[in-house]
Amino acid sequence: MIPSYVFYKKLNKDNVVDEVMAESAVFNNVLNQTVIKSIYKTLNEKRLLLQRTTLTDFRNYLSSSETDLFEEISITCKKDGKTTTRLVTRHKEVSPYAIALSLAPHTYASHYSALYLQNLTLNIPKPIYVKKKATRPKAMPEPEKLSQAQLEKTFAVPAKTTNSIYTFRYKGVTREVYLLEKSATVDNGITRISAPHAPAGIAISGVEKTLIECVLKPNYAGGAQEVLNAFYAAKDRLKILRMMQLLEEGRYSLPYGKNILFYMDRAGYSERQKDLVRQRMSPATQELITYLEKNMHNPALDANIGIYYPERIAVQ
């Protein structure tokens, strides 16, 4: 049974709503069980809740049709059909990115979603791409031990797609979320930006990290052409040394510096800017010929950089 009143009577109805909604806004008005516990604890510390009010009482209060504050939405995993729920505010619109980011702790918007939120693409991607902390550290081979044969074998197969795909329906629109694992060994390069219907802002990869992640996984960014367009759009904002620092910190075994150099060259960056990339590239991989995307058919070769690329890619 839902308690008719869980707050101390010294607070009137408006005070109650204001307190709940102020705490909810800290979490972009998307509440999972962890967030509900956090709000419950905060209100208890402020001595706003009656002592007999349990966490279950409080959750029932939030989702009650009597209070009319929150509605419940379901998020379904496409792989196994398992469903989890979130509470979202009824009377304020909620960002679908905030709902997607609630799937796991320490997540941030990445790839095509980050390109869109960072104004690096004119397209509005339908899926939402977010990254979470890896469940286990990934072993990174030393770049010095990489051979041309290993490189060719790696890029000959199709790009992998995550099985962690979720769907939810909100405001009559069904959204698809790709929940990706972080590939870098460190968590640098993440920022928070303002976004509509997200009062606390959206956690997102910064411009430099966004471009790196799109270079690594162009299949999550609309393909190589979209990545090239993003490099062109970022020309006045991109901090090249910062980008190369993040690339080095990621300890990637493949020579992605050449991919970055290719995009910068095709997007019309200056020789001085491209030299900043060349100077930070591993000498051990300089002689290797790499690939812009996986599983390319009849690619063209840029002999100056040493990289195969899709012949269809258009120069800005």
Image: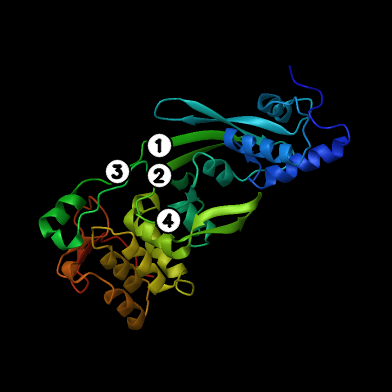
- At 53% from the left edge and 44% from the top edge, which residue is drawn? 101
**Taking 9 as reference, is 212 left or right?**
left
Precedes in sequence: disc 2 or disc 1: 1
The relative height of residue 119 versus residue 265 in the rendered view (above or below) is: above
Report, in whole angstroms, how far the alpha carbon at label 3 lies from the one at label 1: 12 Å
Instruction: Tell me the SS state at disc 1.
Output: loop
**Taking 275 as reference, is 94 left or right?**
right
Residue type of the residue flagged with mark 2: Leu
Q: Residues within 10 Å of mark 2 (few under 14, many from 20)?
A: many
Residue type of the residue flagged with mark 3: Lys
Instruction: Tell me the SS state at disc 3.
Output: loop
Quadrant housing residue 255: bottom left
Question: Residue 164 at x, y = what percent?
Answer: 40, 36
The relative height of residue 129 versus residue 78 in the rendered view (above or below) is: below
Name the foreground residue: 57 vs 235.
Answer: 57
Report, in whole angstroms, how far the alpha carbon at label 3 lies from the one at label 4: 23 Å
Residue under pointer 2:
180
Q: Are marks 2 and 1 in contact (CB under 8 Å)?
A: yes
Precedes in sequence: disc 4 or disc 2: 2
Report, in whole angstroms, how far the alpha carbon at label 2 lies from the one at label 1: 7 Å
Residue under pointer 4:
187
Instruction: Tell me the SS state at disc 2.
Output: strand
- At 14% from the left edge and 54% from the top edge, which residue is drawn? 150
Q: Residues within 10 Å of mark 1 (few under 14, many from 20)?
A: some
Q: Nearer the viewer, mark 3 or mark 1?
A: 1
Residue under pointer 1:
164
